[in-house]
Amino acid sequence: MYNILVVDDEKEITDAIEVYLKNQNYNVLKAYDGQEALEIFEKEDIHLILIDIMMPKLDGNSVTIKIREKSPVPIIILSAKSEDMDKIWGLNIGADDYITKPFNPMELLARVNSSLRRYTNYSSIMVSKENTIKIGGIELNHDSRSLLVDGEEVKITPLEYKILHLLMSNPNRVFSIEEIYEKVWREPAYNPDTVTVHIRRIREKIEINPKEPKYLKVVWGIGYKFQQ
């Protein structure tokens, strides 16, 4: 049984969501502020989080950032804010999905089921030997810093390796160009355009047709992701 943490300061909303989820045989834990959510997350085995943005003590965005520092657990933001920039910000800081209030219960359940399927698949990505990530025909070995494409070794630069490792370690998650730069170069994004150049070179090495990539995909207006 999956444990789903529902975080919202409005009790009526958490209670309603609990009913929907329990009807699908999910186990539900509830929190009414961001600090309580973190405390529950530390104590329980949580498989997915539904979280509001505007909450007392600690807002949903701050909670998402803190959880992303230690866990790939799926996070779906629930918010009355429907502006595109709010959605983009939520996705950029690590949320997997974004649902605008008021929401259709059937849509909520569909998003929950989809996120849990991706998370289950993610948990089975690590294969054969330690420190190896394999998605489709792409295999990345952390110990040897090597890349195999359909079983054949392909030469890769240290920066290309770091970008691939970041994206493959978080399949289907969208990273902005600035975020990739800051995580790989470990400095503020002074020259984020260089990321695009490295992405193009990586595609030339791993894709059959770099112009129609199977793995390293662009999400227009947001950034890049590694498709599982």
Image (cartoon, rainbow, N blue to C red):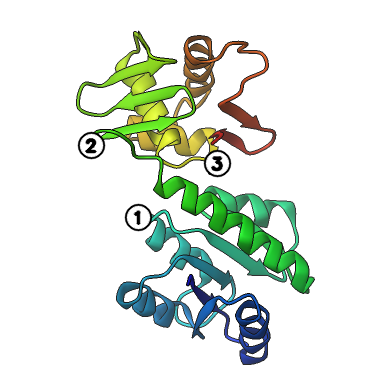
Do the residues under discs 2 and 1 have CB atoms within 8 angstroms?
A: no
Horizontal side of 205 relative to 21 (left or right) equals left
Question: Real-space Cα distance between discs 2 and 1?
Answer: 21 Å
Could one spot residue 73 in this view of the protein?
yes
Horizontal side of 42 relative to 4 (left or right) equals left
Q: Which residue is mark 2?
A: 130
Secondary element at image label 1: loop
Q: Amino acid at mark 1?
A: Glu
Q: Percent position (x, y) of residue 28?
A: 52, 81
Q: Percent position (x, y) of residue 117?
A: 56, 53
The residue lying toward the viewer, choosing from 22 and 226, is 22
The residue lying toward the viewer, choosing from 68 and 3, is 3
Tell which circle, 2 or 1, labels the residue nearer the N-terminal end. 1
Q: Which residue is mark 1?
A: 69
- Neighbour class for label 1 at 10 Å: few (<14), some, many (≥20)? few
Residue at the (54%, 50%) spot, across then down: 118
Do the residues under discs 3 and 1 have CB atoms within 8 angstroms?
A: no
Residue at the (68%, 86%) spot, across then down: 16
- Neighbour class for label 2 at 10 Å: few (<14), some, many (≥20)? few
* Image quadrant in which you'd find residue 71: bottom left
Tell which circle, 3 or 1, labels the residue nearer the N-terminal end. 1
Secondary element at image label 3: loop
Tell which circle, 3 or 2, labels the residue nearer the N-terminal end. 2
Q: Amino acid at mark 3?
A: Asn
Q: Amino acid at mark 2?
A: Glu
Q: Percent position (x, y) of residue 66?
A: 38, 62
Secondary element at image label 2: loop
* Image quadrant in which you'd find residue 170: top left
Residue at the (33%, 36%) spot, across then down: 127
Please tell me whether mark 2 or mark 1 is closer to you in this view.
2
- Neighbour class for label 3 at 10 Å: few (<14), some, many (≥20)? many
Q: Which mark is residue 172?
A: 3
